[in-house]
Amino acid sequence: MAEEAAASKPLPVVPYLKIPDDGEPYLEGLKCNACGAIYLTERRACSKCGTVDDLTPIRLSDKGELYVFSIIHRSFPGIEVPYVSAVVDLEGGGTVKGNLINIDPTPEAVKLGMPIELTYKIAPRKDKEGNEYLTYYFQPRSQ
Ligand SMILES: [Zn+2]
């Protein structure tokens, strides 16, 4: 009769979002020790230089610049539109896709190269076991 218990704290929405027990969440990348290329997903080999088994986890910056974006006007049922889908180059390396929030979703407001920062929020929906998820967004940087 007991249902599967939901986790007592939010789960990361993606594996590269780390949630320390004592500190702020952050994104973690894997950096190639040979050439410095940075990846978000688990891998054994560097696709830039071919080095195998020589990647080190690193904490990525929570600041960056908007590389490219799309303003989404059609999406799945239940997803509020329009919203801004963005790709951000992080300071110190790493390129991350996510949604840009706290900005008017218009071409007049969103500018290529604008400074952004990461912000973390509980995702609006739970899974069927009742688990909450922590996710990340981009927002204009307050400087
Ligand atoms: Zn490499």
Image (cartoon, rainbow, N blue to C red):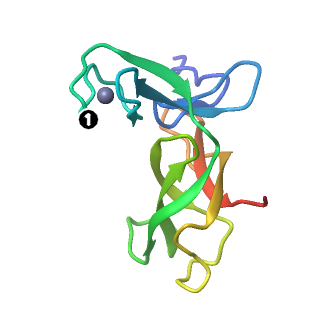
Quarter of the image for residue 46 reads top left
Q: Is mark 1 within 8 Å of ligand 1?
A: yes
Position of 52 with respect to 120 (left or right) is left
What residue sits right under mark 1 in the picture?
A: 48
Q: Position of residue 96 (x, y in %)?
A: 46, 48
Mark 1 surroundings within 10 Å by alpha-carbon count, few (fewer than 14), some (14 through 19), many (20 or more): few
Position of 143 with respect to 46 (left or right) is right
Residue drawn at x 55%, y 67% is 113
Q: Nearer the viewer, residue 37 or 124?
A: 37
Q: Is residue 110 visible?
A: yes
Residue 79, compared with residue 72, is above or below; it is above
Q: Report the residue that reaches farthest toward the front.
A: 35
Residue drawn at x 62%, y 81% is 109
Residue 106, compared with residue 138, is above or below; it is below
Quarter of the image for residue 6 reads top right
Q: Is residue 79 visible?
A: no
- How many labels, in total? 1
